[in-house]
Amino acid sequence: MLKQISLNENRIPEGVKISELDFDSPFYDGLHYNAPARGVWNIVHTGMLIPEAHQIYVCAQGCLRGVILTAAEMNRMENMSWVALREKDMWNGEMESRVIEGCSHIVDEMKKHPKCILVYLSCMHLFEGCDFKVIANELEERYPDIDWVDCYMTPTMRKTFEPMVMMKKSLYSPIKKLDTDKKYIGLIGCDRATDKTSEIYSLLEKAGCKMWDITGCKTYEDYMSLGKASLLISYLPVVYYASMDLTKRLGIPHLPIDLSYDEDEIITNLKSLASVLELDESVVDDLTDRTKKEADESMKKAFETIKDTPVAIDASATPRPLGLALLLTKYGFNVKRIYADAFGKKEKAAFDELCKLNPDIEIYPSMDPIMLNAADEIKIDESKYLCIGQQSAYFCQTRKFVNIVEGGGMYGFDGIRHMGDALLDAYLNEKDLKLTISYKGLECESCL
């Protein structure tokens, strides 16, 4: 059953014990609140990953403010344009023509055409029944030298596809099939680079393969070279929809090797990758014997210093917050809080085990409007929390936090080693919370 968090007399939200939650529907999903912690990427940041591309947003002025400021904060205004919608566009029958003519005007004013243009339609277009195919066909006919990509800024459609899920599909839609290179592997779904020390890179090196990663693409040709990959791999769940589209269009098989903090699951995923790369399982055994030991040493070293310090985790930091909480609990860490609105299906085993090992962990929904006053509970000078993720750091008002998004590029036992090192560093070296969360788009260049 759905649980509603309660308020104390000061209107501060009080979490729900994990043992009292329904895994499938932990909280009511209605009106959303966005905490001011801004490290999480949005569709603007993701679209900017395509080299030599340009973005055009077609939406109401209120929505435009946010995306334009994001581009400005990234020092990337040269890659951003927009067409403002008016109220009369909803009923005058000119919605499609306004998009077409607005985009055409922008392109005609450019000194040089970009290789690719991402056109973002908004909720208004869906409400009005706008025909995007008509728009795309006309723009492709007018400007055949440009790859046109349909994108969507539609936060009101979260009940179907999350905006970022749709954005990941759009991110790879210009890719065309090329002659296959059996030694070329595409890592998809990551906005930030994966640690080069991870077991993924080690296995690829053993197999003599090269990795494609969009974060390393410098030119549009680099980006398009994904079309020659013989295999797609991913470890973030947000990319599954995009991977199905790529496999259907290009015929490239996809192997999910999900980010996990469970020993058995990590080894199973690495052996699956090794098998596809035609490596013997003994290669994985030899590799993980070393990385497991290093991960264990790092976690134990961190715990020796951190001890019973209360720990909080949020779902912006990792897609497997329950799995991470279980790992830390097993090492003795005092995990007190998890900030997450829902859990992925593959978190069920970790949920069940946490209900037994640490049934009093408090779960908070980060997007419920009731969380508006959550940060007022603790004064920053008095906070004792060590947090993983910006959102939990904000809610717990702490200067001690691991500043990562979507796993932070950490993977496998090597990723657990990095996590142990990061926890110890966060505990020993405090950060300026207010300054850190003012930066929109973790690891992006910023004008702030």
Image (cartoon, helix red, strand yellow):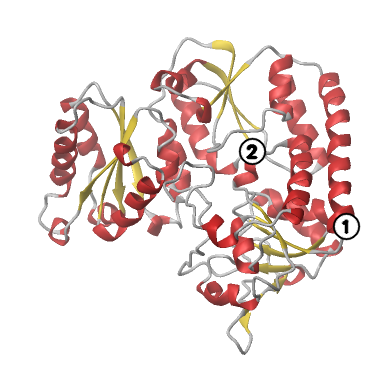
In the picture, residue 143 is in which quadrant?
A: top left
The residue singled out by tag 1 in the image is 332
Q: Position of residue 405 (x, y in %)?
A: 59, 48
Real-space Cα distance between discs 2 and 1? 24 Å
- Give the residue type that dot 2 points to: Gly
- State whether residue 433 appears in this view: yes
The amino acid beneath tag 1 is Gly
Q: Is the residue under label 1 in contact with that under label 2 (CB below 8 Å)? A: no
Residue shown at the point (32%, 37%) measured from the top left: 79
| Residue at x 40% of width, y 38% of height | 47
Query: What residue is rendered at 52% in x and 33% in y?
Result: 243
- Relative height, residue 32 to residue 299 (above, below): below
Give coordinates of residue 157: x percent, y percent: 40, 56
The part of the image, by quadrant, that contains residue 173 is top left
Q: Which residue is mark 2?
A: 409
Among numbered discs 2 and 1, the one appearing first in the sequence:
1
Tell me residue 159's x, y (percent): 46, 57
> Residue at position x 16%, y 49% from top?
95
Q: How many C-alpha atoms fall within 10 Å of the one at disc 2: few (<14), some, or many (≥20)? A: some
Residue 58 to residue 336: above or below: above
Above or below, comparing residue 118 to residue 350 in the picture: above
Identify the secondary structure beneath mark 2. helix
Residue that protrudes farthest toward the left in the picture: 92
In the picture, the quarter occupied by the N terminus is bottom right
Q: How far across and how far down the image is residue 410, in percent?
A: 68, 39
* Residue 340 seen in the current view: no
Q: With respect to residue 24, does 241 lie above or below?
A: above
**Circle 1 sits in a helix, a strand or a loop, which is it?**
loop
**How packed is label 1: few (under 14 Cα within 10 Å), some, or many (20 or more)?**
some
Would residue 262 appear left or right of 11 to someone viewing this image?
right
